[in-house]
Image (cartoon, coloured by chain):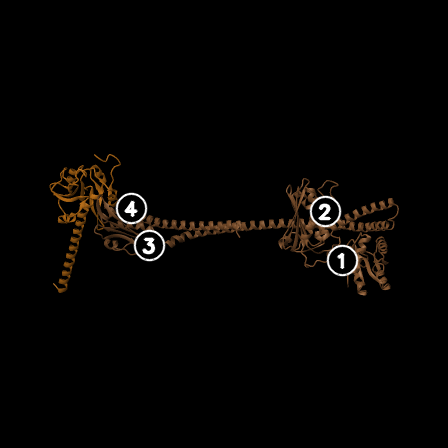
Chain colours: A brown, B orange
């Protein structure tokens, strides 16, 4: 891998190394030059000294004043570099000298040995008025290299220590800077995670509130719809005006029910029936519907990757989600454009999952819905999943579309990401959990299509809310069943014991004291062949994890119509034990 | 005379003769040194006529009594002053125009040392005397057994001679030249 930072790092080290080599070479050259200069200077100094001495001793040498000669010579003792000095007369005899080591008596002997490595030997003629009077011999000591180096040790050591200190300090500063940068990054990451957490907490709080309201509202709506349904069935031949009024009321109630479904979807409280689904097929099947929904100005294209995994998802809800996204895209492209739906396999890794605590790393089937619309401003991108948040003009949107998508996908154990750029378009990516079984269970719709009606069976209805219970009893009677009712688990078990002919129990899930699930388990313990159908608009904790119905449970969602109830009962009774 | 007395006499005679011999040897060495010094002064002195006398021998005159004899001739043999060979000229008396660079005044009946100095005064000749009451420019002296000299730089200046300070520094005593108007 060629990381640009690493390359520049390597270059810098190369540069530092090259500089160090150049510096060492330069200092060696300087040292060698210095050494030769030093020898030259010493020789010059010796020559000068010998010359001065030769000039001084002329008269004393000429007139044999040995005392004066010795005085002149002794003056050079003060110079520590001078090893030996000899003054020889015109006959080559030594007449005065001082020596720290040996010196010959005869000039001829002095001349013969060449200078040793640590010495500089010079001769100076003693002459006056053109008359040669004698010779001065001077031997200088050259200070050994190591001793001269020794003198530089102290300042050199100081310079070295100073450089080391500087290096350590700059390394320290660098480490501090790096640590600061790391800390900065950590702070930024933490802030990001905290923001994500806050967002998800907010969504959860909104969801709980919405869900609570929707659930209670749904129950009441169930009573309204049920009774309207009964009214219409029983008086279908009555006054057409009254029938029409009832039908209008029913219409309104259905719309209200659809709204509460979406609210429940957002609050992740709707009952889901995930199956192992072929997403590419679902998307393909939807294209026609989408073309009709989006109109002629929007081109719809589907792209599907090969070898697509199956997803574990509630298909009708997924279809609703895709339609919701498509409608948003259409509204974002008033002048037309292109909608692309892609499917593909995706793997969300740990690093990706770490950014959002609701995301688990693993295999997902991805559905991406992309439009070429106006895009969403970055400032509001974080709010788009909130219920009733909409960018559309008042009356145009409910603000619940994306909420449904978000709640549903999250409830299904998936993940939603939205990318948008103003003026370019928006992509919403849905990550659906991969199905662990590739078996596709028979579609519920096939069972629903069966004709309702059985007269030879007894059904036990368990429901704590009187309105719902009465509607259920009425509906079952309408469908031709014999009905026994109970207002709670305790009564229900008593009734079961008292009436062995009960073949099916229709029970609410959320009830005070004992919930429907526990009741069903107890009832099955006593009557293994008893069939159970749950009624619920609300599945919190009661049925399996995360509000997903047990795969082998039958469930009818409140509010329900007589036909829906009948179909679910048929399905339950049709299952072999 | 006893034998002991004879022996004592003999020893005494020997001692006396030995001392005399030593004295004689001392004297001859002293003379040799003085003879050598005579021409060794040359490099330390500048003569005004040096240029005009180039090519001619450097002349050392011995005026009057000659204490050196052959010693001097031996001493200067082969010696040169610059590139001028040294010649010895023995004169009975000095004249103002005697062709001498250096003149040793031994004195004679005809011309005393003092007279000789007077004759040579202003003649650009380095006059040398040996312990004379009337000293020349250079006057030998025996100091602690060593031959030394005194220098009369004033007279040298009057004679047009320049004596090297090196020589002056070696002199036992110097009669310094006056600060100005040294030349007559």
| Discs 2, 3 touching: Cβ within 8 Å | no
Tell me the crowding category of disc 3: few under 14, some 14 to 19, or many 20 or more residues within 10 angstroms, Cα based. Answer: few
Total labels drawn: 4
Q: Which residue is mark 4?
A: A52
Q: In the rendered structure, the residue with mark 3 lies on which chain?
A: A
Residue A327 figure quarter: top right
Circle nearer the viewer, 3 or 4: 3
Circle nearer the viewer, 4 or 2: 2
- Considering depth in this image, is B50 or B92 the residue closer to the camera? B50
Residue A528 figure quarter: bottom right
| Discs 2, 1 touching: Cβ within 8 Å | no
SS of the residue at dot 2?
A: helix
Of the image marks 2 and 1, the number of the one nearer the N terminus:
2
Of the image marks 1 and 4, the number of the one nearer the N terminus:
4
Labels 4 and 2 share a subunit: yes
Q: Position of residue B79 (x, y in %)?
A: 17, 47
In the rendered image, is residue A164 in sight? yes
Q: In the rendered structure, the residue with mark 1 lies on which chain?
A: A
Labels 3 and 1 share a subunit: yes
Label 2 – label 1 distance at C-alpha: 26 Å
SS of the residue at dot 4?
A: helix
Labels 2 and 3 share a subunit: yes
Left of B105 or right of it: where is A72?
A: right
Q: Which residue is mark 2?
A: A401
Of the image marks 3 and 1, the number of the one nearer the N terminus:
3
Residue A433 figure quarter: bottom right
Circle nearer the viewer, 3 or 1: 1
Label 4 – label 2 distance at C-alpha: 112 Å
SS of the residue at dot 1?
A: loop
Q: Which residue is mark 3?
A: A118
SS of the residue at dot 3?
A: loop
């Amino acid at each position: 891998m060629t990381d640009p930072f690493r390359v520049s790092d390597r270059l810098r080290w190369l540069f530092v190394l090259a500089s160090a080599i150049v510096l060492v070479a330069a200092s060696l050259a300087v040292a060698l030059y210095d050494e030769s200069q030093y020898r030259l200077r010493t020789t010059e100094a010796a020559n000068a000294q010998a010359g001065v001495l030769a000039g001084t001793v002329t008269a004393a040498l000429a007139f044999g004043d040995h005392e004066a000669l010795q005085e002149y010579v002794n003056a050079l003792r003060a110079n520590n570099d001078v090893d030996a000095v000899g003054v020889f007369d015109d006959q080559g005899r030594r007449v005065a000298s001082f020596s720290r080591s040996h010196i010959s008596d005869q000039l001829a002997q002095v001349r013969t040995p060449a200078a040793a490595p640590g010495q500089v030997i010079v001769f100076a003629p003693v002459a006056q008025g053109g008359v040669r009077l004698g010779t001065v011999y001077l031997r200088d000591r050259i200070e050994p290299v190591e001793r001269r180096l020794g003198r530089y040790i102290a300042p050199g050591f100081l310079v070295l220590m100073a450089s080391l200190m500087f290096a350590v300090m700059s390394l320290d500063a660098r480490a501090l800077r790096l640590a600061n940068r790391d800390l900065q990054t950590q702070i930024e990451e933490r802030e990001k995670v905290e923001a994500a957490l806050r967002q998800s907490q907010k969504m959860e709080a909104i969801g709980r509130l919405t869900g609570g309201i929707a659930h209670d509202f749904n129950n009441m709506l169930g009573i309204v719809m049920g009774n309207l349904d009964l009214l219409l069935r029983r008086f279908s031949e009555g006054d057409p005006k009254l029938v029409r009024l009832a039908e209008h009321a029913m219409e309104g109630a259905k719309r209200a029910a659809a709204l509460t479904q979406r609210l429940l979807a957002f609050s992740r409280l709707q009952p889901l029936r995930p199956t192992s689904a072929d997403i590419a097929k679902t998307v393909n099947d939807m294209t026609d519907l989408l073309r009709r929904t989006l109109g002629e100005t929007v081109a719809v294209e589907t792209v599907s990757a090969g070898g697509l995994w199956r997803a574990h998802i509630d298909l009708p809800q997924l279809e609703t989600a895709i339609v919701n996204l498509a409608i948003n895209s259409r509204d974002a492209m008033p002048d037309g454009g292109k909608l692309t739906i892609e499917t593909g396999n995706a793997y969300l890794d740990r690093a990706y999952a770490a950014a959002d605590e609701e995301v688990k790393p693993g295999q997902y089937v991805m559905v991406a819905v992309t439009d070429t619309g106006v895009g969403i401003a970055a400032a509001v991108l974080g709010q788009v999943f909130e219920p009733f948040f909409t960018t559309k003009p008042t009356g145009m949107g409910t603000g619940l579309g994306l909420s449904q998508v978000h709640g549903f996908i999250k409830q299904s154990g998936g993940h939603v990401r939205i990318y948008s750029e103003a003026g370019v378009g928006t992509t919403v990516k849905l990550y659906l959990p991969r199905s662990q079984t590739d078996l596709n269970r028979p579609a519920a719709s096939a069972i629903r299509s069966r004709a309702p009606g059985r007269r030879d069976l007894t059904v036990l209805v368990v429901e704590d809310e009187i309105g719902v219970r009465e509607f259920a009893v009425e509906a079952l009677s309408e469908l031709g069943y014999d009905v026994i009712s109970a207002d709670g688990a305790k009564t229900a078990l008593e009734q079961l014991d008292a009436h062995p002919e009960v073949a099916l129990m229709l029970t609410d899930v959320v009830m005070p004291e004992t919930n429907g699930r526990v009741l069903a388990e107890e009832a099955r313990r006593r009557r293994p062949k008893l069939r159970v159908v749950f009624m619920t608009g609300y599945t919190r904790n009661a049925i399996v994890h995360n509000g997903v119905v047990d795969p082998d449970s039958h469930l009818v969602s409140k509010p329900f119509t007589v036909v829906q109830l009948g179909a679910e009962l048929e399905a339950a009774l049709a299952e072999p034990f | 005379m006893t034998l002991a007395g004879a022996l004592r006499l003999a020893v005494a005679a020997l001692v006396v003769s030995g001392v005399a011999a030593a004295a004689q040897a001392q004297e001859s060495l002293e003379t040799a040194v003085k003879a050598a010094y005579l021409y060794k002064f040359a490099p330390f002195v500048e003569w005004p006529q040096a240029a005009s006398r180039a090519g001619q021998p450097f002349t050392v005159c011995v005026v009057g009594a000659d204490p050196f004899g052959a010693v001097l001739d031996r001493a200067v043999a082969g010696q040169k002053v610059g590139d001028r060979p040294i010649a010895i000229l023995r004169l009975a008396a000095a004249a103002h125009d005697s062709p001498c660079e250096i003149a040793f005044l031994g004195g004679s009946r005809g011309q005393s040392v003092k007279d000789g100095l007077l004759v040579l005064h202003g003649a650009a000749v380095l006059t040398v005397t040996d312990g004379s009451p009337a000293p020349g420019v250079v006057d030998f002296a025996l100091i602690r057994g060593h031959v030394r000299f005194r220098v009369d730089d004033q007279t040298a200046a009057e004679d047009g001679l320049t004596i090297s300070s090196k020589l002056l520094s070696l002199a036992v005593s110097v009669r310094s030249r006056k600060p100005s108007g040294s030349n007559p």
